[in-house]
Image: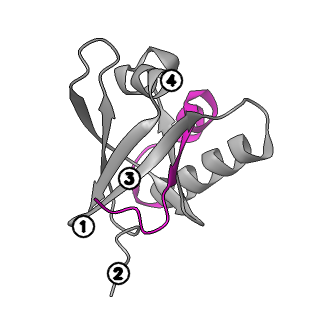
Amino acid sequence: MSDGFDTPVCHVTTIGRVTGKPHRIEIWFAHREGTLYLLSGGRDRSDWVRNIVADGSVSVEMNGARFVGFGRVLSPDTAEDRLARRLVFAKYQPGYAGSLERWRESALPVAIDLEPGGTD
């Protein structure tokens, strides 16, 4: 049985920093050891990233499973920043018609640390 992490996309729900209402997006991701890694092409201008900065509480849905966790923007030029870029790029580049190299380098890496057994 699949753990759901091999699915092409996940849905991340943040709490709106202005409205307090749920804000749901569909996004590419990679998974490693209880953490999801995402790349924001809109960098820190993306609403979902701004929401995470204001309140890191998130929920994630994939393959019918729902997880809770805490999102955080990764510090630049760290080992985790490089890991996030490498994992997400490696998952999607093989099936993508164009090059994702520019996106890999320019996007803002975000991590979501999933709570152990953190389904809700």
* Depth order, front residue of 37/105: 37
Q: Label 4 belongs to which residue?
A: 53
Point 44% across, 19% down: residue = 50
Observer able to see residue 99? no
Q: CA distance from mark 4 to mark 1?
A: 26 Å
Task: Find disc 1 in the rendering and name its residue.
Answer: 63
Specify the amino acid type for callout 3. Answer: Val
Instruction: Name the spot of residue 59 as percent of width and height, x first.
Output: 33, 47
Q: As displayed, is residue 82 above or below residue 35?
A: above
Q: Which mark is residue 2?
A: 2
Is residue 104 on the magenta stretch?
A: yes
In the displayed structure, would residue 95 be above or below residue 23?
A: below
Residue 42 horizontal/vertical position (percent): 44, 21
SS label for mark 2? loop
> What residue is shown at x 35% (from left), y 17% (from top)?
17
Residue at mark 4 to residue at mark 2: CA–CA distance: 31 Å
The span shown in magenta is 94-120
- Magenta stretch encompasses residue 119: yes
Q: Tell me the mark number nearer the camera, choosing from 4 and 2.
A: 4
Quadrant assignment, res 90 = bottom right
Q: Is residue 69 above or below residue 6?
A: above
Mark 1 residue element: loop
